[in-house]
Amino acid sequence: MSVNDRPVFVLAGTGGGDLRSLEDYRRVGGYVSLEKARQMGREAVLEEIKKASLRGRGGAGFPMGQKASFLPSPAQAHGPIYLVVNADESEPGAFKDREIIVRVPHRLIEGIQIAAAVIGARACFVYIRGEYLSEYEILMAALAEAEGAGLVSVPIIVHRGAGAYICGEETALLESLEGKRGMPRSKPPFPAIVGLYDSPTLINNVETLATVPKIIEIGGDAYAKIGVKDSTGTRLFSLSGNVVRRGNYELPHGTTFRELIYDCGGGISEGRKLKAIIPGGSSSPLLTADQVDMSMDFDTLQKAGSFLGSASVIAIDERACMVQLGLRIGQFYMYESCGKCTPCREGTRWIETLLRKIEEGRASHAELDLLVDVCERMLGKCLCPLGDSDAMVVASYVTHFREEFEAHIDQGGCPFGGSSSLEGVRSPVDELYRGRVRQEAAR
Amino acid sequence: MSAPELITITVDGRQVQVPKGTGLVEAAATAGIEIPVFCYEPRIGSAVGACRMCLVEIEGMPKLQTGCTTPAQDGMVVHTARTSETAARGQNATIEFLLLNHPLDCPVCDKGGECPLQDLSFRYGPGKTRMTFRKRSLEKPIPISPTIALDRERCILCYRCTRFSQEVAEDEELVAVNRGALTMIATFEDEPYRGPFSGNIVELCPVGALTSTQYRFLARPWEYERAASVCGLCAVGCNITVQSREGRVQRVLSRNHPEVDRGWLCDKGRFSSPHLYAEERIHSPRYRRGEAGAVEELDWDEALAELERLIGEAHGEVVLALSGTETLEVAYSLAAIVRRGAHSDGVVLPEPALDALDPYRVPLSALAAAEEIVVFEESPVLERAPVVDLWLRLARRNGTRLTTIGPAGEIQRAPGDGAGACRELAGETNELGQRLRKAERVILIWSGRGGAGGAHLAGLAHALGLHEKDGSGALYLPSTPNPRGVAEAWEAAADESSHQPEQIGLLLVSGDEAANDPAIRKLAERARRTVALTLFAGDTASWADLVLPATSYLEGEGTMRNLEGRLQRLRRVAAAPVRPELSWLAELGERIGVTLPASATGIFAELSAKALDGISPSSLGDRAPLPARAKAGPVEAPEPEAPPTVRGGPLELIRYRALFSGPVVEHVPQLAFQRPLPEVEISAEDADRRAIADGDDVVVRSNGISVKLRARINAALRPGSVRIAAEHCSELALGVQVSRP
């Protein structure tokens, strides 16, 4: 299948533009699925979603139909049931939900209304990343228009986040939504049973919900034919890094990294060589250039020791120092660790410290082993995936590029000698740790 | 309630049966196996799984699991660090992470020797450090209040303190700021932590991050003598451990009585021990010759001779005024001197305290499981019985319907109208009353004046049939610690030869509370001679002929009956700087022909034979049981008293006794910041009408007296009432005017 005749679901009808106005969205068949879903009834709609094998697009890839089935029916529930939409897109490399909100906000609203009806929700909450201000305004405008047209039967409340990556983790999101400090909850109980305000809650990603109207339109079976087994349908891939054309590309699952990077993205800038691929956002372990023909689907990536995550593909070319990449990513996780559980709070800082020593040429070989051991000691022991991600990805950098790490130690500094494309790219942590916050604490 | 279903789990090869839903930490403990924890503390809400110390391996699960958050399930096979290399490595990693930034100042840390981090590092931690960078250094200690210091370097961020603040005390004053490795505990907006239960966080802290300023750097924990006693500052009677060194009290800790206090103390109970060493304490008897004569110190022989003479000269016209702070034993000895020695029945009891509620006894812990609680709340529960406030918060979190009736209640009633409300609820047609009749577990609480010792409440409790319902009952919150006990002691000392005096020949004032009570002071003006028995000199010299030094609740053996009706033992945990009452009362008795044992156990035996069914003090144990309920009979609730006439102004003054007030608290400098502010609480409506805003300076007037106070708008308060702490009331009458100056 060539790139040009690929099926488009989430961004269908945009023709490269947007469908922000209700009129435009209706012209391409907007809100017809909502009406159809109402006639089908909640059981039938859920059945179609299950047949579609729609897996969550936020990162974990959990089947939406199954998740919705965990909730009690409105009759069995002790209190209200809620739908929460995770629009706190903050994974480095991910910018697909933003595209959906900006270009097809009504498709998201339609998906929300269909899902809300399926679970019998009393209200829906959209938790949108705080930095997405214009996106928030676009969504609010679309929502007002939809409400005015009587299309919103289950109220939608949009809540802006305050700038914490951790609030994209579903239980931390719930805490934040409740007005508390955004820190993940221990699971079980799962949100399906004890979620927002202790009520049964379904939490779905923006893209997942924006896919639902199309499933209702064409039917679950037809949808499941697109893509590959257990990774059905299309995906909005966010392509970034050292490629010619960065951007979001809606492609069926099963497309290869090569097709995405070279056919869609125009290849690596200035004809340089691909060195590594971050396949699913910053928290997915690294792939090397020789894995470029791998199929982009949930199971293949998992078999390769990584994961498709939020389908945020970052292409890294030969100029990048992998220690610097590790340091930059490690700083992100240290900065974003919420501080609740011990291994993440202390481990992310320890990893950053060791990576910095290696980058600056002050580390010993024993400290490189220690770095790997610290990762191993964090892995699987953290409360939520944040700390595990840091440990896993940093370990993957060492595994794939150990000789580069060792070169830093042997040469007493970065072998790129200042020519790395990541030279000087640091996170706010630099300043934060060494200056301001420490002064604040001392005050 | 039916017996919970039992399930079987295996921990390190040992099979145990536990009720379904039991957490793994508790289930392992049943098997005699420790799963170590830092953040886990079931009393502060559900487990959070933050510290990762309790990692265990569960067969069939790929990752290690936290024991604190995992409920035991039938057939589960669990391996702790004892039998699982993976779990041992996991716990070792947790300790290594925790110690990365933890200062190694154990030799000078107050927690050293009683520190969970020290103990668990020893058992589960790595022997040496692999850390090659500088530890985080922060300014320390930060005084988060005059009583608590915070050392952020030592903090391991288990969030016990913030969870206590948010989920137990619900004061929301403690927060975590920043995030990740920079997370720090702080008070909201850096204001001092004023919550009345703040001291509990010092005990909850598993490291030396939160320390008591009263206790810092005094000595090592293993150097203390410790004694199990009971707090004598209010009628809850929280169980305490008192630690002392060379006879001097160093600190007061909670000693969890699960039915009484759940291991919590209020800051008044926890931080008041410095009153023992206040400069104003009297150390020897003081005698004033003549009306304006010089005050001279007497030795005990002279003092007792003088007292004997004063009793003799009173010719049976002796009146005893009790504070309600006395133990049964001291009250009994005093009563025996007055009734059997001076043949007088003259007494002023601190407040009515009857046995009317004995058929409705419930442990305080029953509040947590109640379906409905109704509080007749003229005074906030917090002010009378602080720990009961925590029980009510727990109940509400557990889903109890809590209804307050009073001037600031959900159902608004005028001050003093609780009895009327009781009558209404007892009626067949009252909506709330009907709901209470249907509910399984109902507890009624009286918190305020005019309760006739619980009699009004007893009438309602009987009408609702609470004596027949398990887990239901009624509680009367008195304003003094042991009013019921002193009344019983007075009764038990009755003597056929005694009679009511017609005049006051000699007024014997026992305790600082009575000595500071304006009503007692009026009696002293009428008395020919007055003897005061107090801890602090105060102004006693101006109105008492003879002042005798008293001991504190921490300095003598004895018993008190708490508000549930539980008899609890107080122990002598500090060396008294003065002669104990029981000793000199026995000697005085000898002089006037009253035989009194000189020891608390001797007096208890005598008292017990007369009034307590012969129970022995040892039967009370370290955690005293609640006596069985009395048999319920029909109750004739007394007629509600006619409301007092409000004169002097349009607003009715509620003069209240703040939690942090009274003679003991006033002699603890570290608690000065908790004393009631010079404020008048006023309803929003009354404030509006007078164009008064929150925080404005106002003048409160009545009977030609005016007091300058700050206005505090209390949104819950009914229009027509204002609240002022007793110490800021001056001589204001019941009716007051409030206006801008």
Image (tube, coloured by chain):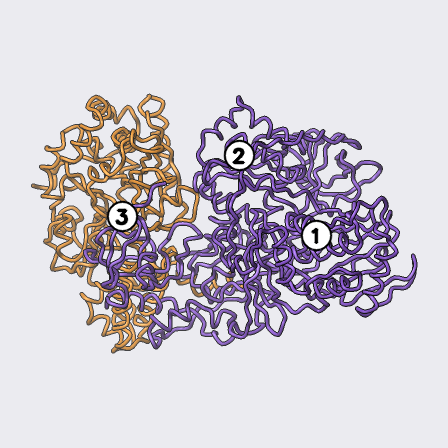
Chain colours: A orange, B purple
Q: x%, y% of residue A142?
A: 33, 29
Residue A94 - label: 3
- Residue at the far left: name it: A1
Identity of the residue drawn at 47% across and 72% down: B113
Please tell me whether mark 3 sits on a helix, a strand or a loop. loop
Which residue is denoted by mark 1 in the rendering?
B493
Q: Nearer the viewer, mark 3 or mark 1?
A: 1
Please tell me whether mark 1 sits on a helix, a strand or a loop. loop
Q: Which numbered disc flags the more N-terminal residue, 2 or 1? A: 2
For residue A249, side relative to residue B70 (left or right): left
Q: Tell me which chain the residue with mark 3 is part of.
A: A
Q: Distance between the residues labelled 2 and 1?
A: 41 Å
Neighbor class of circle 3 (other Cα within 10 Å; few <14, some 14-19, many 20+) is many
Q: Quadrant of the C terminus of chain B?
A: top right
Residue A334 in sight in this render:
yes
The amino acid type of the residue labelled 1 equals: Ala
Which residue is denoted by mark 2 in the rendering?
B403
Identity of the residue drawn at 66% across and 40% down: B712
Neighbor class of circle 1 (other Cα within 10 Å; few <14, some 14-19, many 20+) is many
Asked whether the residues under the numbered discs 3 and 2 touch, taking CB atoms below 8 Å apart as contact, a structural biologist would say no
Q: x%, y% of residue B641?
A: 70, 31
Q: Tell me which chain the residue with mark 1 is part of.
A: B
**Residue B249 drawn above or below residue A193:** below
Identity of the residue drawn at 64% across and 50% down: B485
Near-viewer residue (B330 or B648): B330
Please tell me whether mark 2 sits on a helix, a strand or a loop. strand
